[in-house]
């Protein structure tokens, strides 16, 4: 029989599951994938085709949760209508955790970077929610189990349980109890991350559907698992050796390969805008001029730049609108 999200939750939560607090507040960081997750082996349990590696940012989502007499969700103080797609998604996720003494929730979510920065906040949001529920019900779960529960909300959310570099192990078991993220405990010296906002236009297709269509229609997808396996192995080696150039070269190559794979879908999936392509050329030109900077991009038109402190001023003079962040390890 097919394993459901409810089966997974049942296997993880303690037998006695009662509300222990009225209100909790939790933070979880945004994470940016360096080696991307693109494609599901099991859409019900959000099990990925490949492992992936991310870095957590110093910014993210603060979420306050309390028991309530009906579901009420607020995003930056604004109440979501019950037809809002995010309300529907959140409510379905919370169905996994409702109890007789806590049938409904009030959730207040605030993202601490301007939305114009174009960072995906569903990962930090679902992770902060799971961390909050863990405290509200006093589950006392391990980081591994918190990561598994966050994954059921949004795949990449499982990587927001840790700071610094984080590896999501794809796992092999059909219940997904071995598909979780854990810290990759190394650092790259003086690493800086720049978020480059390029377009605020609504994205043409969300990552869930885009992944599905890529898997179903892109002939290049068959190469993707092998590409990821090699990139993951090599970037971990570069991180352990603190080799920034190899690190940057691999992450940019991985991002471009993911986009090439989705561009080859039918119909083609293209998140790039003309500003995106222009910015890519400007990054390559900076690099030719001796500034060691690399880019990555996700399911949206904005770039994330990776460089070291010594090159910060050069990057800022080319891209004054860059939000520069220092990752905390
Ligand atoms: O977890 P989702 O459905 O938001 O998908 C994340 C997809 C990428 O951001 C493009 C890659 C990744 O690994 O985060």
Image (cartoon, grey):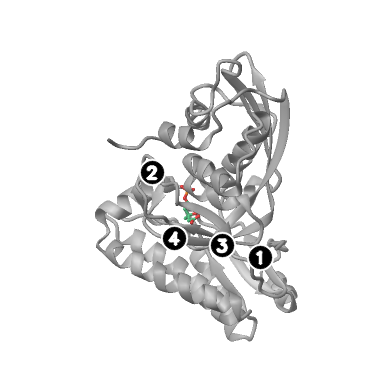
Q: Of all residues shown, which one is farthest toward the top?
A: 69
Disc 1 packing (10 Å; few <14; some 14–19; many ≥20) = many
- At horizontal 59% and vertical 65% (from top left) the residue drawn is 184
Q: Confirm whether residue 204 shows in the render.
A: no
Q: Label 3: state its secondary structure.
A: strand
Q: Which numbered disc, 2 or 1, marks the residue closer to the eye?
A: 2
Which label belongs to residue 51?
Answer: 4
> How far apart are labels 3 and 1 at the CA level?
10 Å
Where residue 60 appears, as percent x and y from the top left, is: 67, 48
Name which quarter of the figure residue 170 lies in: bottom left
Q: Confirm whether residue 129 shows in the render.
A: yes
Q: Label 1: state its secondary structure.
A: strand
Q: Earlier in the sequence, mark 1 or mark 4?
A: 4
- Identify the residue position indicated by label 1 in the image: 193
Q: Which numbered disc, 1 or 4, marks the residue closer to the eye?
A: 4
- Identify the residue position indicated by label 2 in the image: 175
Q: Which numbered disc, 3 or 4, marks the residue closer to the eye?
A: 4
Where residue 102 appears, as percent x and y from the top left, is: 60, 19
In the picture provided, is 66 more to the left or to the right than 90?
right
Q: Earlier in the sequence, mark 3 or mark 2?
A: 2
Disc 4 packing (10 Å; few <14; some 14–19; many ≥20) = many
Q: Earlier in the sequence, mark 4 or mark 2?
A: 4
> How far apart are labels 3 and 2 at the CA level?
35 Å
């Amino acid at each position: 029989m097919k394993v459901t999200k409810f089966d997974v939750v049942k296997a993880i939560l303690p037998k006695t599951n009662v509300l222990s607090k009225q209100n909790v507040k939790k933070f979880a960081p945004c994470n940016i994938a360096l080696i991307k997750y693109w494609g599901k082996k099991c859409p019900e349990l959000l099990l990925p085709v490949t492992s992936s590696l991310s870095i957590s940012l110093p910014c993210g989502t603060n979420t306050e949760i309390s028991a309530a007499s009906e579901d009420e969700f607020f995003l930056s103080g604004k109440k979501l209508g019950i037809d809002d797609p995010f309300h529907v998604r959140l409510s379905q996720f919370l169905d996994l955790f409702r109890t007789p003494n806590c049938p409904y929730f009030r959730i207040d979510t605030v993202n601490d970077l301007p939305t114009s920065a174009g960072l995906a906040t569903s990962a930090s949001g679902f992770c902060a929610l799971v961390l909050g529920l863990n405290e509200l019900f006093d589950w006392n779960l391990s980081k591994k189990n918190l990561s598994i529960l966050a994954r059921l909300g949004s795949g990449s959310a499982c990587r927001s349980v840790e700071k610094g570099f984080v590896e999501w192990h794809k796992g092999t078991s059909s219940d997904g109890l071995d598909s979780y993220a854990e810290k990759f405990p190394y650092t790259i010296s003086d690493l800086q991350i720049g978020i480059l906002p390029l377009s605020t236009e609504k994205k043409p297709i969300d990552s869930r559907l885009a992944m599905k269509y890529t898997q179903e229609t892109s002939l290049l997808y068959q190469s993707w698992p092998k590409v990821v396996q090699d990139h993951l192995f090599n970037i971990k080696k570069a991180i352990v050796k603190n080799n920034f150039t190899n690190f940057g070269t691999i992450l940019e190559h991985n991002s471009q390969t993911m986009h090439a794979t989705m561009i080859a879908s039918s119909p083609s999936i293209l998140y790039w805008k003309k500003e995106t392509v222009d910015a890519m050329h400007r990054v390559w030109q900076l690099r030719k001029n001796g500034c060691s900077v690399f880019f990555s991009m996700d399911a949206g038109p904005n770039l994330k730049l990776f460089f070291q402190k010594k090159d910060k001023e050069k990057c800022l003079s080319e891209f004054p609108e860059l939000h520069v962040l220092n990752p905390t390890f």
